[in-house]
Image (tube, grey):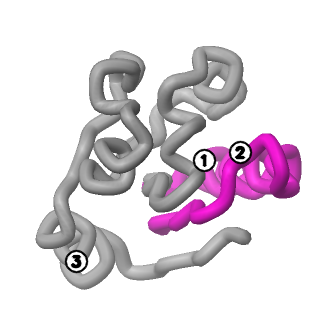
Amino acid sequence: MLIILGKSPFISDYESLVQLISKAVERDEKVAILHIQDACIAVASDKYLKKLPLGIEVYALKEDCEARGLLQKIKNGVRTVDYKGLVDLVMNKHDKTVSWT
């Protein structure tokens, strides 16, 4: 499952998202979260990343991070992807996609 987060977790229902991810991980589902738009702010926050369960893939859209001046602040373990990488994640790497607002 690929979860695409578009809003900053500081203004969205982030706790529910963490619960959803945790339940999916418990069911041994492969889970990845892709941060786009204002959600990219979160990949520069240890507080945010520490809440995510272990074993999930964490991505951020490089162009959105760059637009917000975050490329040098992205935490370890977060992979950046360009638009081609985003399409690959959606079309080839995951069988389900959830847009989280």
How far apart in space, not on screen, are marks 3 and 2 (Cα)?
25 Å
Q: Quadrant of the C terminus?
A: bottom right
Residue at disc 3, secondary structure: helix
75 and 55: which one is in front? 75
Q: Which residues are magenta?
A: 1-30
Q: Is residue 46 above or below residue 10?
A: above
Number of marks present in the image shown: 3
Between tags 3 and 2, which lies in front? 3
Q: Which residue is mark 1?
A: 25
Q: Decide which of tag 1 and tag 3 comes sooner along the chain.
A: 1
Percent coordinates x, y for residue 73 in the rendering: 39, 20
How far apart in space, not on screen, are marks 2 and 1 (Cα)?
5 Å
Q: Amino acid at mark 1?
A: Val
Check contact, mark 1 vs mark 3: CB within 8 A: no
Quadrant of residue 90 in the image? bottom left
Would you say residue 54 sits in the magenta stretch?
no
Between tags 1 and 3, which lies in front? 3
Is 22 on the left or on the right of 40, as rendered? right
- Could you tell me which residue is drawn at 55 percent across and 38 percent down? 41
> Residue 87: which disc?
3
Check contact, mark 2 vs mark 1: CB within 8 A: yes
Q: Which residue is mark 2?
A: 22
Q: Residues within 10 Å of mark 3 (few under 14, many from 20)?
A: few
Q: Decide which of tag 3 and tag 2 comes sooner along the chain.
A: 2
Residue at disc 2, secondary structure: helix
Q: Is residue 48 above or below residue 26?
A: above
- Could you tell me which residue is drawn at 82 percent across and 56 percent down? 12
Q: Amino acid at mark 2?
A: Ser
Percent coordinates x, y for residue 54 in the rendering: 54, 28
Residue at disc 1, secondary structure: helix
- Could you tell me which residue is drawn at 37 percent across and 54 percent down? 64
